[in-house]
Amino acid sequence: MAATLHDVARLAGVSFKTVSNVVNDYPHVRPSTRQRVLDAIAQLGYQPNLSARSLRSGRNGAISLAVPELRLPYFAELADEVIRAAERRGLVVLIEQTNRDRQREVDLLTSARLRMVDGLLFSPLGMTAEDVGLLEIDLPMVLLGERLFHPTVDHVMIQNVETARAATRYLLERGRRRIAVVGVHPGEVIGSAGLRLRGYREALEEAGIAVDERLFGPAELWYRHQGAEAAQQLMQSGVEFDAVFALNDTLALGAMHALITAGRKVPEDVAVVGFDNTDDGQYSQPALTTIDPGRREIAESAVAALVRRIADRDLPVQHVPVGWSLVERASS
């Protein structure tokens, strides 16, 4: 038979009300108690009765996650973390893929499909600052990423400038002075590429090293083949470089493949650092040094913020920067 809230309460040694509070993510539960309940939910495989919940509360027990594309490992792994965080709260997740297309992102915000969910986690890539007014929708929403900001919408964000500065400083501290950057979007200021390039520039300036734009490897999309092409173009240009900072891991893996194919040793000739700490980087040859931007914390914080917003639309708006770390491996 399916586990019930009463079963969870008995196993966790708490009241039915406490279990209900944890499932609905009410804030006034001690962390140790919350963890006991979550452990019991996981052990019993508890699944909420969404139909009954919807009839009682007027809610659907579902949220939507809209991401640019699941082909990129970062977004696939983020979706996995969001699903896990939502399941711990008795929610299901409907995935929307917008393919980085502005019109699809705009259409999503007025889509009838959103009537099926209680809230939206939204990571736009196609929309611009001119579209920010379109975020004013009658549905609880939390923004992810740095493409759009809105003063009245909750936002969970990566510390892009700080992490890129740290990655570049890390290479400088290891004696690298000619650091190429792969994945540049020329002219972009707001957005992951623009912010990460800004962090790169700031680290060089702090070290008294002039920024050489010949070391910029543009890549409109952040796939492996574009990382490889950018690295090949840098090598063919004749510009000297002893390190690559790639703006995501997928680009880094492509760049590393191109370097090794061309006879460059990694890291002896060229050190490589990526960004995202996706699973693939652990198993590349050599294993990829990368920035872990806090993907699990992003998912947990975003789902928690959305659940709070669903419960109380009058709460103060939250803008939450998540923690990060540099994961050192053999490529550097």
Image: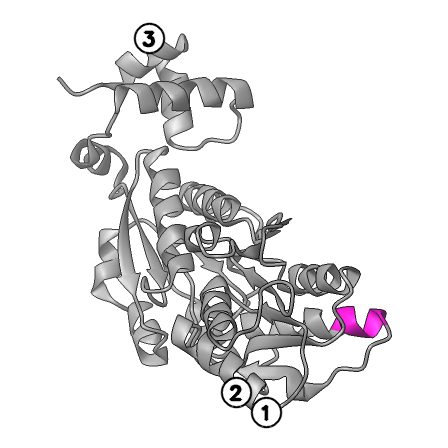
Give the main secondary structure, helix, strand or loop, of the magenta stretch: helix
Question: In the structure shown, which secondary structural element does the residue marked by tag 1 occupy?
Answer: helix
Amino acid, disc 1: Ser
Point out residue 134 in the picture as x, y percentages from the top left corner: 42, 73
Q: Is residue 2 left or right of residue 278?
A: left
Direction front: furthest residue: 263
Quadrant assignment, res 269: bottom right
Amino acid, disc 3: Arg
Residue 206 in the magenta stretch? The answer is: yes
* Dot placed on the residue nearer the N-terminal end, 2 or 3: 3
Query: Marks 2/3: CA distance?
Result: 63 Å
Amino acid, disc 2: Gln
Residue 17 in the magenta stretch? The answer is: no
Q: Magenta residues?
A: 202-207
Question: In the structure shown, which secondary structural element does the residue marked by tag 3 occupy?
Answer: helix
Q: Are marks 1 and 2 in contact (CB under 8 Å)?
A: yes
Q: Using a 10 Å C-alpha cutoff, classify the residue at mark 3 as few (fewer than 14 neighbours), some (14 to 19) or many (20 or more).
A: some
At x 77%, y 68%, the residue is 203
Indicate the quadrant containing the N terminus: top left, top right, bottom left or bottom right.
top left
The residue at which mark 3 appears reads as: 10
Direction bottom: furthest residue: 237
Q: Which mark is residue 237?
A: 1
Point out residue 201 in the picture as x, y percentages from the top left corner: 73, 75
Q: Is residue 255 left or right of residue 166?
A: left
Question: In the structure shown, which secondary structural element does the residue marked by tag 2 occupy?
Answer: helix
Q: Name the colouring of the figure.
A: one colour
Q: Which mark is residue 233?
A: 2
* Dot placed on the residue nearer the N-terminal end, 1 or 3: 3
Q: Is residue 21 left or right of residue 214?
A: left
Q: Is residue 215 above or below residue 244?
A: below
Pick the residue in front: 163 or 117: 163
At x 26%, y 24%, the residue is 45
